Amino acid sequence: MEEIARESKRTGIKTAVNIVRAINNVTGAIFFELQKRHSDLVRENLTLVYQAGESSSDLPEDFGGLMTRPYISGRRQPLEPIAPEDKLLFDGKQSTSQKFFELMGGTLLVYPTPATAVTVKGDYAKKPLPVSGMADPIPYTDHFLSTVRIGVLLLNKYGLLYAETNEFKMALNDQLSDTLVHRKGYRRRVKSSIY
């Protein structure tokens, strides 16, 4: 953090608040790219327990989206997303065979309501904790310190709103790709020239 803060102040970001905002924008963009790539760096096991008669369970605070469809422990078939018009079919009904799920706010609902206790499992993308001060650890710096540094410097140069542009996302994506390829030991595929 100190190195990024020194570099940021040297190149123009004067306040700690703006450095923290820039870091959170960059780590959010890194999370989004890692989630899109189904990277193991953000994959976390999901285990939710539903008691008989309960159809909802709270998701973890760091829940950033499902990476696999959830399933009932001990069963092979994953749960399907429920269509809004089908929810009425299960209103107040209990069963020992759940077939559908729905994400609603910070909860995962299963349909029909379990008549006996069940455990839902799957994988989710773990969101990084936001940085709130200069002493907080920066997410992803173990693997992507250079990506975080470049992202913060770009936001310093063009402003915090630049994080919403496709140009910024492409620049981070390129840097991230290079790092991931290097990390896995693969060579990056380059399109051949037309000449």
Image (cartoon, rainbow, N blue to C red):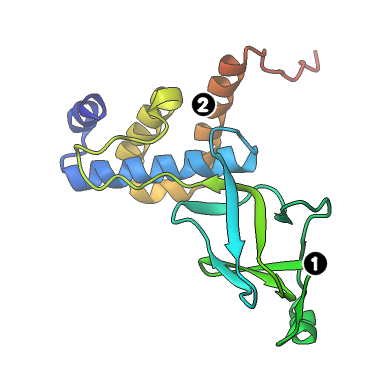
Q: Secondary structure at mark 1?
A: loop
The percent coordinates of residue 32 (x first, y second) are 54, 45
- Rendered residue at 76%/68% (across/down): 100
Q: Which residue is mark 2?
A: 175
Quadrant for the N terminus in the image: top left
Q: Residue furthest right?
A: 77
Q: Earlier in the sequence, mark 2 or mark 1?
A: 1
Is residue 120 visible to the viewer in this orientation of the structure?
A: yes
The amino acid on which the numbered mark 2 sits, given as a three-letter code, is Gln
152 or 76, nearer to the observer: 76
Q: Which residue is mark 1?
A: 99
Asked if 108 appears above or below 22 in the picture, the reply is: below
Residue 81 sits in quarter = bottom right
171 or 86, nearer to the observer: 86
Q: Is residue 176 left or right of residue 85?
A: left
- Rendered residue at 70%/70% (across/down): 116
The amino acid on which the numbered mark 1 sits, given as a three-letter code, is Lys
- Rendered residue at 76%/16% (across/down): 193
